[in-house]
Image (cartoon, grey):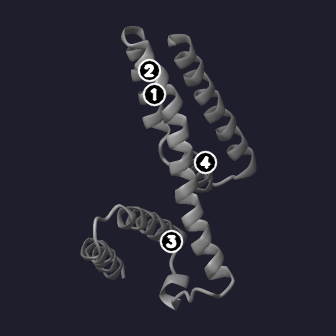
Amino acid sequence: MMLYGTLSLILLVVFRIIVSQIAEVKYSKHSKQHEVFNYIFARNFNYSIAAYVILIVLAFFFPRIALVLFIIIPIWSFVENSHEHGTLSLATRGMEEGRIQVPESVKNLSPDQRKALRAKLASTIKASRGAKDESQKREIWSQFAEWAADQR
């Protein structure tokens, strides 16, 4: 079990190195490289390394529990990342096709401001889906609206 964890950790690091090398070759701007890296790993790379290291230690003492977690973690990560990317790509596609009207104030944002808006929108959508009732959803979206108003 510990060998499986070690192999998984090595493969994760090798995959990260490959992605970094490809991003460096394809994009000259560091911000674009970082954006590609975040898109692929969805800002969870450091957490994944920490989880694998903890699981390797856990596998020494409790191999059956570690086995279950070694199976669950990649599946959970895949579902979480694909769900986040799917929601954002649907919104982007709707804007491009003209089904979703984009205000001029959003069109005139700088790339950094758009990135911040997109990240805040993604976290708001995620929080909204986890809301227990409609009043909590309204509160979450109200906080997003207040944040957006403060950004002007």
Q: Which mark is residue 8?
A: none
Q: Secondary structure at mark 3?
A: helix
The residue that label 3 is drawn on is 114
Q: Is residue 22 left or right of residue 47?
A: right
Determine the CA span between mark 3 and mark 4.
19 Å
Q: Secondary structure at mark 2?
A: helix
Element type at mark 4: helix
- Neighbor class of circle 2 (other Cα within 10 Å; few <14, some 14-19, many 20+) is many
Identify residue type, mark 3: Arg
Labels 2 & 1 near each other (Cβ < 8 A): yes
The kind of secondary structure element at disc 1 is: helix
The residue that disc 2 covers is: 66
Q: Nearer the viewer, residue 57 or 40?
A: 57
Q: Are marks 3 and 4 in contact (CB under 8 Å)?
A: no
Circle 4: is it few (<14), some (14-19), or many (20+) Cα within 10 Å?
some
Residue kind at label 4, given as amino acid type: Ile
**Where residue 37 appears, x then y in whole percent?**
59, 47
How many neighbours does mark 3 have within 10 angstroms: few (below 14), some (14-19), or many (20 or more)?
some
Q: Which residue is mark 4?
A: 40
Quarter containing the C terminus = bottom left
Q: Is residue 133 left or right of residue 58?
A: left
Nearer to me, 59 or 85: 59
Q: Nearer the viewer, mark 4 or mark 1?
A: 1
| Disc on the earlier residue, 2 or 3 | 2
Q: CA distance from mark 2 to mark 3?
A: 40 Å
Q: Using the image, determine if residue 52 lies above or below residue 26.
A: above
Select label 4 or label 2 by which is in front. 2
Asked if disc 4 and disc 1 are in contact, CB closer than 8 Å, the reply is no
Residue that mark 1 sits on: 69
User: Looking at the picture, does residue 44 appear above or below residue 102?
Assistant: above
Percent x, y for residue 35?
A: 57, 54
Q: CA distance from mark 4 to mark 2?
A: 26 Å
